[in-house]
Image (cartoon, grey):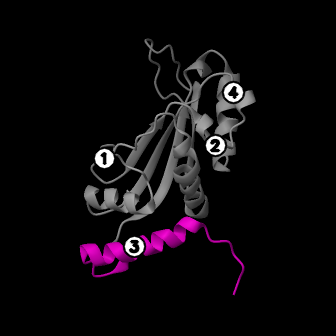
Amino acid sequence: MSDKYIPRLIEVHKKVLAEMVKKYNYGNVMQGPRLKKIVISCSHNAAKEDAKYLDEAVSQIERITGQKALRTKTKKAISNFKTKVGQPIGCTVTLRRDRMWEFMDRFINIAIPRMRDFRGLSNKSFDRVGNYSIGLKDISIFPETQASKITKTIGLGITFCIKAATVSEAVTYLGMLGVPFKK
């Protein structure tokens, strides 16, 4: 046997999947819902005037995720937003496999409890295929951030991409994994 590290949430996922097979009468374990990837994105309005704010956001997101961030650029010039084509405006990170499970574990057990006035996440943020999206106003809830280096608040968009037959299965799946939804 190898001594490969297995993230804690993978074991929870296997138990949840076994329970859901019984609950929904799947013919096979592979019919159950599963988390495919987590996409974390950030766009910084101040990046239009000064590139150092975008550099700051990229470095903080890389610290949170443990993975290099891809810088995104504008595709259209919009005069009302004062943007030009090809102007750097944000960044994105796609997490899969072990990094995905580690991030989700830290998000559920460390970051969410640090939110101010937290009463549960909305279960209405699912799209029609079962993907769940959350918007965070400030990244300082993550312990990996360096608060002394943050000059402006940085917001995040987090999308959990779930393979599920229905939205209700995706809600049940995330709830059983430990995501605290509003009652």
Magenta stretch: residue 171 in it? no
Query: Between marks 4 and 3, how big is the CA–CA gap?
Result: 40 Å
Please state the horizontal and vertical placement of residue 123, each as a whole percent of the image.
32, 47
Looking at the rendered image, the disc whose residue lies closer to the viewer, 4 or 2, is: 4
Circle 2 packing at 10 Å, graded few (<14), some (14-19), many (20+), is: many
In the rendered image, the vertical position of residue 71 relative to residue 82, given as above or below: below
Q: In the structure shown, which secondary structural element does the residue marked by tag 2 occupy?
A: loop
Circle 4 packing at 10 Å, graded few (<14), some (14-19), many (20+), is: some
Q: Mark 1 is on which residue type?
A: Asp
Mark 2 or mark 1: whose residue is earlier in sequence:
2
Query: Between marks 3 and 1, how big is the CA–CA gap?
Result: 22 Å
Query: Between marks 2 and 3, how big is the CA–CA gap?
Result: 31 Å
Magenta region: 1-30
Circle 3 packing at 10 Å, graded few (<14), some (14-19), many (20+), is: many
Q: Mark 3 is on which residue type?
A: Leu
In the rendered image, the vertical position of residue 96 relative to residue 75, given as above or below: below
Quadrant housing residue 46: top right
Q: Nearer the viewer, residue 133 or 12?
A: 12
Mark 3 or mark 1: whose residue is earlier in sequence:
3
Mark 1 or mark 4: whose residue is earlier in sequence:
1
Looking at the rendered image, the disc whose residue lies closer to the viewer, 2 or 3, is: 3
Please state the horizontal and vertical placement of residue 76, each as a whole percent of the image.
46, 24
User: Which residue does the image show at 43% across and 12% down from the upper left?
Assistant: 80
Q: In the structure shown, which secondary structural element does the residue marked by tag 1 occupy?
A: loop
Looking at the image, the residue that sits furthest to the bottom is 1
Q: Nearer the viewer, residue 52 or 106?
A: 106
